[in-house]
Amino acid sequence: MNSVNLVAAAEALTEHWSPKVVGRVNDQYVKVAKLLGELTWHKHDDEDELFQVLHGRLRIQFEGGRETVLEAGEFCVVPKGTLHNPVADEECWIVLIETVTTKHTGDVATLRTRSIEQQLA
């Protein structure tokens, strides 16, 4: 039962778009990541995904031209099956809460895709 400072955990990251697992609650992983630029359009057929901004600003684009902008302290839940694309115009630090079965880039594989083994390292 150790405490985790989410800001310090995110600050320590050296790669963008490479989430690291910092905790687990039942069947959910708590992850931190640094983002810059855009990831890729993707969806998670069976899992919701929570994005919370610790530092900076994150835009999440949704199919149909809609988007949500998150500032530090705000979060958004992306429902399962929703096509989305996270975009950080400037460096952004986030917390992700995802079911342990959630694939990093969902139904798409890119050079930025990280396996759960890489996220646990």
Image: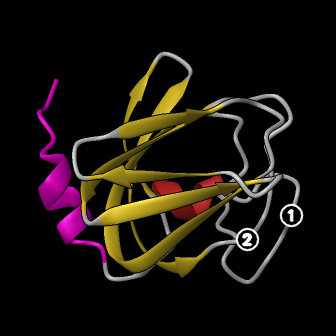
Residues drawn in magenta: 1-13
Q: Quadrant of the N terminus?
A: top left
Label 2 packing within 10 angstroms: few (<14), some (14-19), many (20+): some
Pick the front one: 44 or 75:
75
Residue 54 higher or lower than 77, as above or below: below
Q: Amino acid at mark 2?
A: Thr
Q: Nearer the viewer, mark 1 or mark 2?
A: 2
Which image quadrant for residue 12? Answer: bottom left
Mark 2 and mark 1 in contact (Cβ < 8 Å)? yes
Residue at figure coordinates x 33%, y 63% from the top left? 57
Whole-percent x, y for residue 63 in the image: 81, 53
**Number of numbered discs on residues:** 2
**Residue 3 falls left or right of residue 29:** left
Residue at figure coordinates x 42%, y 61% from the top left? 58
Q: Residue furthest top?
A: 26
Whole-percent x, y for residue 37 in the image: 52, 82
